[in-house]
Image: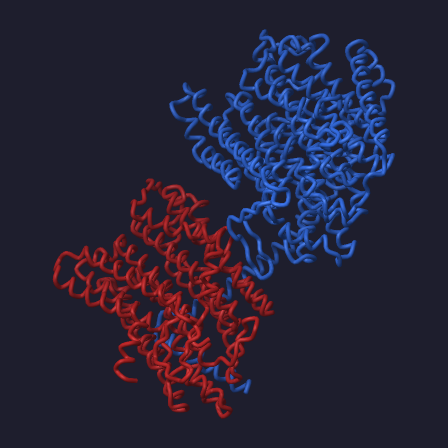
Amino acid sequence: MNFQSLINSLQYIKPEIVIAVVIVLVVTTDLIMGKNKSLLPWISIAGLIVASFFVIEQFSFKAVSSNANGSIGMITADPFGAFFKIIVIVSSIIIVFFSLSSNEIKEAFERHGEYYTLIFGMILGMFFMISSADLILIYLSIELLSLSSYILAGFTKHSLRNSEASLKYIIYGGASSGIMLFGISIIYGLTGTTNLYLLNSFFHLPQFGGFIFWLACILIFAGIGFKISAAPFHFWTPDVYEGAPITITAYLSIASKAAGFALLIRFIKVTFIDSVDASGYWQLLNLIDWKSFLILISILTMTLGNFAALWQSNMKRLLAYSSIAHAGYLLLGLAVLSDQGLIAILIYFAIYAFMNLGAFFVVMIIANKIGSEEIDDYKGLGYSMPFLSFSIAVFLISLTGIPPTAGFIAKLYLFIALVDAKMIAVAVIALLNTVVSLYYYIKVLKNMYLVRPEKEMPAVLVSPAAFAMLIVLLVPIFLFGIYFTPLVNLAKSSIGLMGF
Amino acid sequence: MYLTVLLPLLGFIINGAFGSKISAIGGSASDRRNEKVIGIIGSGVIGLSFLITIIAFFQTLALPVEERKTIINLFTWLKVSSLDVGFAYQVDQLSLIMALIVTGVGFIIHVYSIGYMHGDKGFWRFFAYMNLFIFAMMNLILADNFVLLFLGWEGVGLCSYLLIGFWYDKKFEKSTTSDAAKKAFVVNRIGDFGFLLGMFLIYLTFNSLNFNEVFTRASAFGVPETTFAFIAIFLFIGATGKSAQIPLFVWLPDAMAGPTPVSALIHAATMVTAGVYMVARCSIIFASAPAILTVVAVIGTLTALFAATIGIVQNDIKKVLAYSTISQLGYMFLAMGVGAFSAGIFHVMTHAFFKALLFLGAGSVIHSMHHEQDIQHYGGLRKHMPKTAGTFLIAALAISGIPPLSGFFSKDEILWYSFANGGFLFWLIGALTAFITAFYMFRLYFLTFEGKERFGHEKPASTRSNRGEHPHESPNVMVIPLIILAVLSAIGGFIGIPEIFSGEHGNIFHGWLEPVFKNAERKLAIYGLHTHFQEILLMTISVAGAAGSIFFARYIYLRKPSIASGTAKKFKSIYNLLWNKYFVDELYDATVINPIVKTSDSFLWRIADNKIIDGLVNGIASLIESASVVIRKMQTGVAQFYAVIMMVGIAAALFWIVLSL
């Protein structure tokens, strides 16, 4: 690879370059402007918008590349990656707005420079996770994401809860990345390469297989499973979600999970694929029974998540478990191992981003007002905060998957994919899980609307900024619940991974 | 064209969301003005829709015949494998006629309602529902696929229930208006179930729910007749529910609990004809199943006769009109059944004119009589409200089939086709029903507007709030719609003059609709077997019979009222049978409702629900509870423990692999 081709290939990482520039900008602005931090969020948003232009450009990149001669590098740029990057960008923009109205973050005013720098560190890590096609880069990008998020989880230093969350996150994260690195080293030892495309061509050779090979793959999966909080690698999730500042919790539950999923999908499809048949089903190499493995993991994940959520009394913890359950549903989409399943995942993620962010946002606003995240303190909120209660009701109903909200469409496409793949039994289990989830979501609504508050609460008004934010989050929930064709079409055109 | 659908929705949104605010502006002093704002918004949007429909009509008229069908695809709604449902509207000859009727008559009735509903506390709610109804009805008519049609179908049903129970706190006969609404709801559900089954079967057979595709595939050969028969019978069950045919007609008389404009718009002019429209739209499917077509004709004929006979003895002015509606709908189905699709739609149109007029006239009478609805307590009202009486007379003549009013042309066309295509018996019963219709309509007219005044003294004065006040003519906002409808009822028939009178021009209405039905008619192929002489003969018979009935009614109810009561006494059993509407409600109570109520109470509720289901649910709940306790316990908060679980998880996965190797 000569210098010229290196320069040429830079055009494929324009979004990543923009993010890196923003990191530098934020740090220098923070230094120059001194006490005045109000510029930082706007620099961040401007940077994200610029990055989004370059990402949209990547939608038009041909999914089937001409790099058949084996000169594939570490980075891919394809519509699939662009879709996930857009999800990351949109949720980042929303999170920046969240941070503007979050009391927790406002209190740590003097460290805002640090806050936005670390967020962009996370974004850079996620972008590389989404587009990396090399085990080394996968590991590095996960570390970049993780290290930034460890610090952010403990961002408000004076809170004991925060520090505990951060520490647990580091220990657990350290352990799982160690395990993953071990897996990668075994793979490298077996094949002498870390590039996914090269691995794929190696694995076509007959001599691969056996226990050691399985071991490596499962160890790598453990590292990714940690990021997407799949059982049994999910234990950090509730503790960290509860302890971290709520903006970061919301961010971890969407963006970091999206990046993890993009990585997992790319890893499995690129590395193990044999061929894609006419109706869009992926024939994997006969090395590892990914299908059964993923089904097992996803059922375990959604069941554990839902069952544990049943008795939670803290809203953040409840949403943490619910996000574990949703990771389970999403894994099912992958377990189908077909283009249709992939489409379902993309649709699910786009909708999930809005409804989950919305739910966290309302929880945050309510916490700002009443100083509590306990479900018991939500009693009678339907009367004192009608608009906030209505919004969270919509988000929770959508998370359950009841029409006419977008959450229904998300689940619908997922179940259609399952049924089309003749995975009826799995679909039934997922459906029963949805019923279980209905219980704990509705419990919140019951507290808000049917239980009288212990003490009279004055009517609380929502600030115009928060009102606008909620409208922005509510509109897609209803819009995609009724008119979802554009989203479906976008998802259909975004399933192209480089090389396929 | 799609604006005609969206405008009523806009009206609904404005009146629904801000109606209560508008009526609250300025306190109670400015009630009248606020009502005007709501009324103008409510009727204005319908008026605009009507204008747009007229424009679209003339644009379509200017096109050559083959191009008179446009599809407006707003957006794709559902696309799942081979199921492709669009929010698409189909503007063709049939849907244009229906749209003209719905928006035109709808507009007139909206204007009328401004006067009729004056002072009602739910004024804004009324207009919001009415707008929503027009929106749903336009969806039903203009839909280019079964799913959108079903959306409209359910939408009009919803509005119908909302409006039947509009005065939800009012007593209605033995129960309340909300019970009447409930009855309509339940009966319609049965029909809708049939319709849904039909829809599923269509999708199964033709792999599409789009009208064009289904009908094209249906005209091709290769689908067995039995499949068509099943589809047709299911669709027809749906139609019997919506259009109040035997055996699902029982809800319509009770639907009269709603405000009278509602009865006029929904339960006479438009919604109840949705079943007829649907059968006409699916004419090719019905034509492919001749046996079911005969069933349609038989049911239609029987319903016509059956309802007409009940109409003779009813005393509630709206009930008489309700049974007359059922009877006229029977005619329309008879027309469908004998393959005279355009004649049926023609009757839908003329019936919309004169039946809306009848109901609005009745509303005008009820309005001035302070909500007295018993015709035995009317009489001599012509002196007090001449305009209402005059327009009512025109409508009554039209429905009786007196030339040259509109009803004559449409009804006689149906009778002629039922003779030519169906057979003598259909014609006989149809003609007989026509005579009965003329009789009871004029019984209604004479008892209400002519003869002695029978109001004002038999009721104790205390129950009347406005005692001493004479019945009075209604305000202009109500009378002008009556006059417009009267003109339409009088001349509306001229666009459908049969061939024998119009000569070379042929039947204009028939010619307009011909492209829509030509496939179905070609499939049936039963035309031109009879002579013009026969046609004129039959026409003469029916006109003479109707005129005779009118004079008979005049003789009995004006000259010799004693005959009526005498006959009723003499044939007490028959009178009772008719008075009690053949005991159909009681029959349903005994055979369907009571057994269901009993089983659901003793078995379903006490055993199945309380013991089995609740037990099961509680059992599962406690199982889940204990499971979740275990899971929750695992979340100890100790990071080392989590790491251990992770390792155990990996080990378990590896163990599983070793086993499967």
Chain B: give its colour.
blue
Left or right: where B134 falls relative to A10: right
Report the residue at 50% width, 56% height from top.
A408
- Colour for chain A in the figure: red
- Of B134 and A98, nearer the camera is B134
Q: Position of residue A74 (x, y in %)?
A: 34, 79
Give the x, y percent position of residue A289.
Answer: 52, 80
Q: Position of residue B104 (x, y in %)?
A: 58, 30
Camera-nearest residue between B30 and B99? B99
The colour style of the image is by chain
What residue appears at the point 22 percent right and 62 percent down from the top-left corner? A158
Residue located farthest toward the front when viewing the structure as drawn = B504
Give whichever of B85, B496 is nearer the camera: B496
Q: Residue at x 60, y 35 (%)?
A: B160
Residue B168 makes an appearance in the image: no
Figure quadrant of residue B317: top right
Q: Position of residue A63 (x, y in %)?
A: 43, 72
Q: Is residue A483 above or below residue B326?
A: below
- State whether residue B221 is above or below residue B429: below
Name the one closer to the observer, B150 or B309: B150
Q: Residue at image x 61%, y 46%?
A: B150
Determine whether, in the image, residue B640 is placed left or right of residue B430.
left
Q: Does residue A142 appear anywhere in the picture?
A: yes
